[in-house]
Image (tube, grey):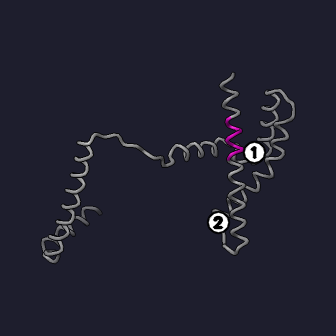
Amino acid sequence: LLEKTKSGLLFYVKGVELLWNDVIYSLRLIGRALQGYTLQPREVRTLRRSFKDIITFIPFVIILLIPLSPIGHVLVFGAIQRVFPDFFPSCFTETRQNLLELYESTEYTEVVIKETWQEQVTRALQASLFVLGDVAKKALGGASGNSAEDDDDGNSNSNGAL
């Protein structure tokens, strides 16, 4: 019971956080539009979604604050969802919450690679050998770039790729 309560509360906290971020982003977009910037269709959709979320957030919170039993809330929200499927703010949907989790899990974080000095030297040597080999290939390829043998290899590679 405690875990369900904690996960439910976390769901609403993330939803409010998403709504706040949407409002801030929308205010920036409105500011850019007022300065004469033409909004992209994606940005216009974001503004519309945020406006709808703000409008639907107010009755959503009122219904949440009405002192009903948990079963009463489930019945009320179930009935509302059947009659008005877009009633819930998008930031309080599982799809949007899952997207937030996906973005949070794939953020670029500072990765510390622990390797011994031998591994560091080996990796540096491999990289320098690769660079030297690439430079040598370009130098040799540039000197004999017009030969028939190179043209045949180029054609066979491009035909093989098709």
Q: Is residue 9 above or below residue 26?
A: above
Q: Is residue 58 left or right of residue 157?
A: right
* Quadrant that contains the C terminus: bottom left
Based on the displayed image, in which of its 4 quarters is residue 136 positioned? bottom left
Horizontal and vertical percent position of residue 115: 31, 40
Q: Magenta span has 13?
A: yes
Horizontal and vertical percent position of residue 74: 78, 32
Identity of the residue drawn at 63% across and 67% down:
40
Q: Magenta span has 65?
A: no
Identity of the residue drawn at 80% across and 32% down:
73
Q: Main secondary structure of the magenta part?
A: helix
Label drawn at residue 129: none
- How packed mark 1 is, by other alpha carbons closer than 10 Å (few <14, some 14-19, many 20 or more), is some
Horizontal and vertical percent position of residue 128: 22, 57
Q: How many marks?
A: 2
Marks 1 and 2 sit apart, C-alpha to C-alpha, by 23 Å
SS at mark 2 in the image:
helix
Q: Is residue 73 left or right of residue 158?
A: right
Q: Is residue 60 left or right of residue 39?
A: right
Based on the displayed image, in which of its 4 quarters is residue 9 positioned? top right
Write down the residue under mark 2.
41
88, 18: nearer the viewer: 18
Label drawn at residue 88: 1
SS at mark 1 in the image:
loop
The type of residue carrying mark 2 is Pro
Horizontal and vertical percent position of residue 98: 60, 42
The residue lying furthest to the bottom in this view is 146
127, 160: nearer the viewer: 127
Q: Is residue 106 above or below residue 2?
A: below
Specify start and end residues of the magenta stretch as a single range. 10-17
The type of residue carrying mark 1 is Phe
Which badge, 1 or 2, comes first in the chain's sequence?
Answer: 2
